[in-house]
Amino acid sequence: LDYQHVQVPFEITLWIMLASLAKIGFHLYNKLPSVVPESCLLIFVGLIMGGIIYGFNDRSPPVMDSDIFFLYLLPPIVLDAGYFMPSRPFFENIGTILLYAVVGTIWNVFGIGFSLYGICQVKAFRLQDVSLLHNLLFGSLIAAVDPVAVLAVFEEIHVNEKLHILVFGESLLNDAVTVVLYKLFRSFCEMPTIKSVDVFAGVGKFFVVGLGGVLVGLSFGFTAAFTTRFTKDIRVIEPLFVFLYSYLSYLTAEMFHLSGIVAIISCAMGMKRYVEANISLKSHTTVKYFMKMWSSVSDTLIFIFLGVSTIGENHEWNWPYICFTVIFCLIWRALGVLVLTFFVNRFHVNTITSKDQFIIAYGGLRGAICFSLVFLLPDFHRKKLFIAATTVVILFTVFVQGMTIRPLVDLLAVKRKRESAPTVGEQIHIRFLDHLLAGIEDISGHWGQYYWKDKLEYFNSKYLQKILLREYDQPKSSIVLLYEKLERKHAIELAQAGQLGHGPAHSSFLSSDRTVITDQKLEDTPNPDVLDNMQEILARNLYRIRRTGPAYNRHTLPGDSEPTERAKEILILRHKSL
Amino acid sequence: LDYQHVQVPFEITLWIMLASLAKIGFHLYNKLPSVVPESCLLIFVGLIMGGIIYGFNDRSPPVMDSDIFFLYLLPPIVLDAGYFMPSRPFFENIGTILLYAVVGTIWNVFGIGFSLYGICQVKAFRLQDVSLLHNLLFGSLIAAVDPVAVLAVFEEIHVNEKLHILVFGESLLNDAVTVVLYKLFRSFCEMPTIKSVDVFAGVGKFFVVGLGGVLVGLSFGFTAAFTTRFTKDIRVIEPLFVFLYSYLSYLTAEMFHLSGIVAIISCAMGMKRYVEANISLKSHTTVKYFMKMWSSVSDTLIFIFLGVSTIGENHEWNWPYICFTVIFCLIWRALGVLVLTFFVNRFHVNTITSKDQFIIAYGGLRGAICFSLVFLLPDFHRKKLFIAATTVVILFTVFVQGMTIRPLVDLLAVKRKRESAPTVGEQIHIRFLDHLLAGIEDISGHWGQYYWKDKLEYFNSKYLQKILLREYDQPKSSIVLLYEKLERKHAIELAQAGQLGHGPAHSSFLSSDRTVITDQKLEDTPNPDVLDNMQEILARNLYRIRRTGPAYNRHTLPGDSEPTERAKEILILRHKSL
């Protein structure tokens, strides 16, 4: 037996296997996941595993390594989040999200830090040796909302899109603030005196870290898109580039002490559109599938490791400090959301209701990022107290808040996510209004979101698409793409029902058979009735739509479509009539 | 800048990126790969990279780590080989393959070892200090044909299926012999005296290593199939199990000093059938795609690393020894193939022609396995000589033999692979003959391959399928599956041509449009004319085939098909007539 030799890959594989089997196990009992969020169950599995290891070895089980977490477990989840980010609601609310992520996080850090320092002055608690800087350092790591925890809980409760993107977007973008404040306070802790120059440098650094992350991400994203232009003869390695470039963007950002999370999100959002147009359909399926698979495994592993790492003897249980930490986390977040939303609502027509505000405040879950950061702290005599407090805050938010948020959403009747996708009519109207508003903003000289979106679209069609897309000469309107997708689906259904080539389709029969194909939840399909209706309208008008050519755009004239395309069209029609 | 922190993942990602970009680069110039095999080009890239590293650092570039090769680079390639192994020709020629792999390899080891020992006795070469045991040890690592090198060259020259499986199968299965002989001689080198008991133990060990590998592989394969029974609600992690279980089988086998290659191949071949029936279509695409992608990247990395590791100062250039190694490798392999084929041809009707024998002997390429094994040798004063000899043998076989084998195949007019897949008629006849021969063998009491295949099929349908398949009650005949696949493809084509629901298909038009879909080389598609013909026949007779139910099997009665299936059939027909 030569265990030493294969130990590393063997143990990694076994952990992943455990995670996957745990996931299967939960889904076998359908009732359990509807009451308890999966993240809680996984932490519970981790606690049991940790207990077993502790019992057998008689020493603390190995703690989740911060390097493993930041280098290997976090990137797949963030990549998945960025790649499947609904870009419209994200950019519509980018101002609010940034306000919550930047000002909100700073507010929380200083709020929690100063109030905990106040608690430390109470003599009865015997905490006088914890300095203000240490409290602020602790505040900087405990204040940030965790994207992994938020995603795990919010994916199950299906609140409306705006609410979801506000909480989730904040949890992603506050990384830049957390990185800066955490490193700033940590270096302050080690400095003999702090000059005011250092404080200003810290403020400047925030912009460098955030914008630098965006820049690194976008440059890698565009390089990825450019690379996939040349993979036509070797389709099989196409999916690799999506993963390689986004991972490189993360690592590069981390290397330069920029925000890796911001970088990977910009990379994913930047490349998605072009990569999808360049790679084949099967490569695309593989990319989507593997991304979901990887992020789901990473997510599972993180929660299990959280559970395992909780067991052990590296905690100092000073209960007053721990309890006040939990209380202050709740209070300062609630206050922050209230104050910031007050300002946000003054400048917006679509206000954030008080119910939504409550869910935003209540959904501020803490997770593995805090946990990894607290272990990265330099050794000092109260580190174990901070570890204990962080553990309790995470378990409290994930278990208590995570388990009660669903009943609360039901109780408050928070507006839910629309069940069905927008109809074709709605989509056309949305698009029409976009163009209209862009025009109005242009005329009135207001540089709003529609103005910028339109400028970006212009830049995209004029320069980016020509460089990054392999077949630039055939841009297709999204309605034609939708039609093609529907037709493909319809055709597969026909084939499965054995009706192909035997006459026109019976949509009434087919709709009952549709469940066969849509069993994967990867696709966002509208409901079948709307779908049939859409398809009928499109089929009737397809030729005309095709002839109109590329999507309407203020910067291209109608009739710009390629003559070869049109010739092909005529050929098809002639073939049909023969 | 904090490079230390991200060094490991960053450098791994960069190497993979280099490999992928090199692959894209070669395919941009279409002429190059048709003359020089890709493996040669990649070694060349590696040589350049190695030269650059050597030039800048002024010391030998890092050598490919044997652990990295055996634990991370080799498994994906072997898994891919096992998963896509054409099982029919493999099992039809299993006897010949085993003869080449076991007896042939032993023959080569002792032949090369003893003749090199003879060379060492020539005083002029100053090699008298290399003992017989060391020569045999060297023989054991240089004798084995390398699956990675063979695959890289043979995939490009398209020789007939039997020839391909003989060389490729040998290269895979000789792993067990190599492992045993290499470890045996290495332990003999360290022993003071060798008893005859040790020699017999070595012979017994061969069976343990080979059969143990098969056993480990099959048990993991069946566990994998069993696990995928329960993934219906969580499709997204299905592909993971295929990779996890096969990797575990490899690691477990390596842990117990069994043959990891044999284990992973048995695992892949054992699970394929059941896993494919259990997982969804998209999961299946992802599995196939990712396997191909991973193996192609591993393959690329291995050849690049081979090139990089060649540069440096760890060679001892004793040219007589090196040249005689190359010559003996060629001579003993040629002799071995001649002698063994003589015996094989006496017992077979389908003989191996002398042209085929030449290609088998000439296709015995050496590769990265020898290279890794020579670096794993214990330190002794002539290790650098062995490294130099191995490097030259590998470069000679890959460059000289790899580049000349294609012209030789053309020159000798070796029988090529059939361009088209067998027609439906042929397939039906093959299957009919299988049953007939199984019956004849059963009556005549001859335990031949058809007898065993039939018994295995019985065992499979009676026990294995019930345990391992989720929906056991709907086994489909392969002809129905083929029809479904054709119909699905046809439907997608119709949808792309915009002809769906507008009347019956025009197959003449469609066949010209077919290239759109079949651009991925993952699918083995027959040529379009045969396909159309097949589809027409199938469409006409589909109802009848469906009613006949599951595939004909000696152990199930016709008419065993499920009544619910039949009811559904009638429902579809009624719907159509409405």
Image: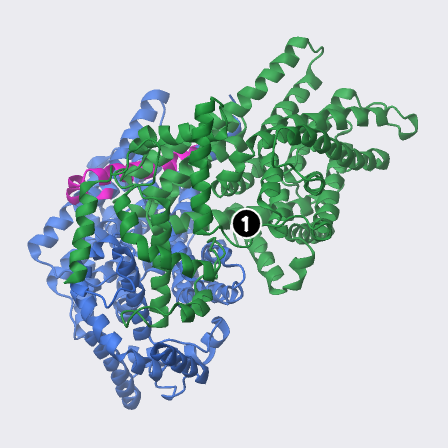
Chain colours: A green, B blue
Name the amino acid type tagged 1. Answer: Val
The mark tally for this picture is 1
Q: At 52% from the left edge and 54% from the top edge, which residue is drawn?
A: A420
| Above or below for B340 versus B47 | below
Question: Please, what secondary structure does the residue beneath circle 1 have?
Answer: helix
| Above or below for B112 versus A213 | below
Question: Is residue A57 at all visible to an observer of this figure?
Answer: no
- Residue B283 placement, left or right of B330: right
- Residue B420 placement, left or right of A407: left
Point out residue B466 in the picture as x, y percentages from the top left corner.
48, 76
Residue under label 1, please give it. Answer: A297
Q: At 16% from the left edge and 53% from the top edge, which residue is drawn?
A: A571
Q: Nearer the viewer, residue A48 or A256?
A: A256
Outermost residue on the right side: it is A124
Principal secondary structure, stretch drawn in magenta: helix
- Residue B102 placement, left or right of B358: right
